[in-house]
Each structure stands twice: as structure tokens, then as C-alpha cells.
């Protein structure tokens, strides 16, 4: 028979072993004999989105000393227990084992994912496990809300943001992208998706142009100076139009793909803008992942409504980029009328110019379809490039204050050059470090 002392010793050891096991589980740590395995990253507080990457970090010790020649494997599974991936970890700096970057796969179940670590070190072996949080990415959210898939625009390490989201699953738009800090010319990538319910006529270049300017109206991430050339092509399995676009600056590389997807009865326009790309195919890469899911009954609602405005005024003259010398010849800006004006309606002419790292804006109003650029702008310190656009406005009375609202989209963003004669010194120093056009 066991002595009373022996039973107490056995009970004490059992309690201590239980406490040690609880403590080890809480720290994602396990000991198998002298082998101790500790998962340093990811931890229980780690949150990561699908599509992002993580690098596992594991410490393996024997009697407190790091083991350098172990075989360490991390197996990852989603909340349903379905395997998601397996990666090896190598010993290195900090006396720990690190994996290469592993991308969390898309279109999986969000929630607590599990990592199981298997270690073999000679005759010693052990395992431990831990979990971390995986959330849906913006791509998953867009698919669920609007019925299309698009990979995140992350060229050159850009961390993208969804900067605009309007409308609903039937008619809407999103703008998604980002910028890397730089001097004067920034590295950028942006992708815009616009969709409208129904089949719009896209039989020739002029109909595509009118769809972009009249039915969509609000285009892109930078002011658009001109659309074209237009080229018939195929995008995935759809008949499409490839439309080049000229942005505000010479380095803006802008393209649009416009097509009708009969499986969801929607007409799409995918716009891409790239600055400082690594590849000539950067625009195509940004839109390459796009697909629609005809089986998904998307009914999402965006945070903002999609405004339905009149087409922007069509600019007539001066021609895009026309140069003027001196103030003798008036610079008369002209455009086509949008409609017969009511008493509270007018055109707003927005003029923007740059000087000494500053963008300066001036708004003028008129009920006519032309406006003379004031000579005072010529004499004001400037960089000789004056951008202008026009839109139709209406004055509204709210309480005792007068406010204005847009009735039309803005026109294209044209510009003129206005220089002093070569034999006449200008009254201000040239402080124009930024690109002007």
C-alpha cells in the first residue's frame, strides 16, 4: 500500500505539472522533455487581412539553450480546420527560426486561424499551436457588396486606401490606390471601377467617349485633359474598348477599359493611373485580376450616394495647350451651353495655376458661354500655365444664407500658356520647381 507521504508527493507533482501546462498554453509554448517551443509571431493579438503577408518567428531551446539545427514546420489552417498553407522556418539572427513571407489566401473564412508548429531536433521532437485573427480584405468586401473581384493595387509596396465609394450594387463607383512619398514626382497607383446597370451602346469611339463623359461624368484620380485614342480590344472574354487619357501632368499614365458584361447586365469602366511604374504593362497589371461573379446576388450600399448630374460643358477654345504671348490678345475661354439657364443658374469657371510650390485657385462666374481670362492673372506671380474647367451651378437659399450646388459634372481640364514677350522682363522671379503640364 502507498504511504500517506508518497500519495501527497504524487498529488503535489500532478498539480505542478498541470500548472506548468496551463502556463505554457497561454504563452503558445510547450516543453517536451528538455525541448521548449515558443511561437513569438504571430501572437494571439495579431490581426491581419486576407492577401497580406506574415513571417512566423519561433524559438526552440533545450535546457534554456537555443537549438540551431532543428527542422521547424508551421502548418496554418482556417477556422473550419481547412489547411491554408505550410511553411518552413530557418534558424538565424536573434537565435530564432523565421519563415519566408507567407500570404494569407483570399476568399477563405474570416476568424481565428490556427498555426501548428512541428519541431524535430535529432531524437527530440515536439509541437505546439496558437491562433491569430484573420479579417476580410477590401477585395472580399467589394465582392460581397458589389459582385466584382479586384486585387489590391500595391505596386512598389504602396499601401492602398479606398478613397471613394459611391452608389450601390446596381450603379456605383470605387477609387482605390495610394502614393509613395517623394519629391515633386510621386510614385502612385490607382484603380477606379465604375458600373452602370444595363447595356449602353458602345459601337464606336464617339459613343464610348459620350458614355465616359456623360453617363459617368466624374472620372479618375487626376483631372483629365483629354480622352483618346480609342482602340477596340478584348478584356478577358468581353469585347471592350481601350481608351488612353491625358492627365494634368505629362507623367500621368492613364487608361480606361470599357465593356458590357452580359452575365450581370452591367456596363463597366475600369480606369487605371500609374506614376513612376516599374513596368510598361503596369496599367494592365492593375486591372488584370478583375472578374465578376454572376452567381452572387450583390445588394451592397455604398457610404455615399452616386450623384446624377448633367454632362459637363464641352470646351471649345482656346485649343488645349495653346500659347499666348503678352496681354494684347485677350484669351477668350469658350464652351458649349449645357442648357437654357434658369434665373438662379450660372457657369463657374475655375482657374488654377502654380507658383513657388503653391497651387492657387480662382473661381469666376458668368451666365454667358465664354469668359475672358483676366489680365491681373498675367501680372500675378505664376508659372505661365493656367488650367481651367467649367461646370454648371445653381444658387440655393438655405435659411438666411446663399449656397451653391453643382448641376453638371465638371468639364475636361484644359490649359493655356501665357508668357511675357522675350524682350520684356517679367515682374516676378521664376519660382517653378514643379511640373506644370
Image (cartoon, helix red, strand yellow):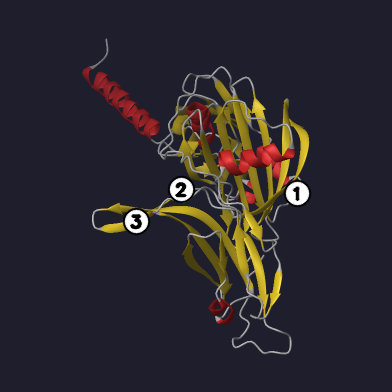
Quadrant in the picture for the N terminus: top left
Q: Are marks 1 and 3 in contact (CB under 8 Å)?
A: no
Which residue is pictured at 35% across the width and 31% down the height? Answer: 20
Vertical placement of residue 363 versus 293, above or below = below
Q: Which mark is residue 279?
A: 1
Q: Residue 10: x and y, percent?
A: 30, 21
Check disc 3 and report the residue beneath it.
403
The residue furthest left is 4
Which residue is pictured at 78% across the width and 39% down the height? Answer: 231
Check disc 2 and report the residue beneath it.
407
Q: Residue 59: x and y, percent?
A: 52, 40
Q: CA distance from mark 1 to mark 3?
A: 47 Å
Q: Residue 33: x and y, percent?
A: 48, 29
> Quadrant of residue 8 in the image?
top left
Mark 1 Cα within 10 Å, few/some/many (few <14, many 20+)?
few
> Quadrant of residue 265 in the image?
top right
**Please, what secondary structure does the residue beneath circle 1 have?**
loop
**Residue 49 in view here:** yes
Question: Between residues 65 and 228, which one lies in front from this camera angle?
Answer: 228
Amino acid at each position: 500500500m502507498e504511504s500517506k507521504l508518497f500519495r501527497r508527493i504524487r498529488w503535489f507533482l500532478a498539480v505542478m505539472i498541470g500548472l506548468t501546462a496551463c502556463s505554457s498554453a497561454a504563452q503558445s509554448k510547450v516543453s517536451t522533455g528538455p525541448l521548449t517551443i515558443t511561437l513569438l509571431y504571430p501572437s494571439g493579438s495579431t490581426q491581419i487581412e486576407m492577401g497580406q503577408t506574415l513571417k512566423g518567428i519561433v524559438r526552440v531551446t533545450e535546457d534554456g539553450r537555443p537549438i540551431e539545427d532543428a527542422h521547424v514546420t508551421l502548418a496554418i489552417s482556417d477556422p473550419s480546420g481547412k489547411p491554408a498553407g505550410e511553411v518552413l522556418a530557418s534558424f538565424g539572427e536573434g537565435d530564432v527560426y523565421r519563415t519566408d513571407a507567407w500570404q494569407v489566401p483570399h476568399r477563405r473564412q474570416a476568424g481565428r486561424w490556427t498555426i501548428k508548429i512541428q519541431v524535430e531536433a535529432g531524437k527530440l521532437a515536439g509541437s505546439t499551436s496558437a491562433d491569430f485573427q484573420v479579417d476580410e480584405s477590401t477585395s472580399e468586401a467589394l465582392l460581397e457588396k458589389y459582385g466584382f473581384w479586384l486585387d489590391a493595387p500595391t505596386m512598389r509596396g504602396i499601401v492602398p486606401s479606398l478613397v471613394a465609394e459611391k452608389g450601390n450594387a446596381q450603379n456605383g463607383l470605387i477609387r482605390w490606390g495610394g502614393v509613395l512619398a517623394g519629391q515633386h514626382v510621386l510614385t502612385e497607383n490607382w484603380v477606379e471601377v465604375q458600373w452602370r446597370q444595363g447595356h449602353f451602346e458602345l459601337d464606336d469611339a464617339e459613343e464610348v467617349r459620350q458614355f465616359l463623359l456623360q453617363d459617368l461624368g466624374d472620372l479618375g484620380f487626376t483631372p483629365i485633359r483629354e480622352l483618346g485614342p480609342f482602340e477596340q480590344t478584348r478584356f478577358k472574354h468581353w469585347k471592350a474598348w481601350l481608351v488612353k487619357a491625358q492627365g494634368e501632368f505629362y507623367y500621368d499614365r492613364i487608361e480606361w477599359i470599357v465593356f458590357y458584361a452580359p452575365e450581370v447586365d452591367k456596363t463597366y469602366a475600369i480606369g487605371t493611373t500609374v506614376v513612376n511604374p516599374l513596368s510598361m504593362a503596369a496599367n494592365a497589371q492593375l486591372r488584370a485580376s478583375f472578374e465578376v461573379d454572376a452567381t452572387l446576388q450583390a445588394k451592397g450600399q455604398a457610404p455615399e450616394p452616386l450623384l446624377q448630374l448633367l454632362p459637363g460643358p464641352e470646351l471649345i477654345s482656346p485649343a488645349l495647350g495653346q500659347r499666348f504671348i503678352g496681354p494684347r490678345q485677350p484669351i477668350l475661354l469658350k464652351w458649349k451651353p449645357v442648357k437654357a439657364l434658369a434665373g438662379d443658374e450660372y457657369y463657374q469657371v475655375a482657374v488654377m495655376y502654380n507658383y513657388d510650390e503653391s497651387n492657387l485657385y480662382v473661381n469666376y462666374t458668368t451666365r454667358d458661354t465664354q469668359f475672358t481670362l483676366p489680365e491681373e492673372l498675367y501680372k500675378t506671380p505664376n508659372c505661365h500655365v493656367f488650367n481651367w474647367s467649367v461646370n454648371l451651378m445653381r444658387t440655393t437659399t438655405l435659411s438666411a444664407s446663399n449656397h451653391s450646388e453643382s448641376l453638371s459634372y465638371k468639364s475636361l481640364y484644359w490649359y493655356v500658356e501665357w508668357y511675357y514677350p522675350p524682350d520684356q522682363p517679367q515682374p516676378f522671379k521664376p519660382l517653378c520647381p514643379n511640373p506644370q503640364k
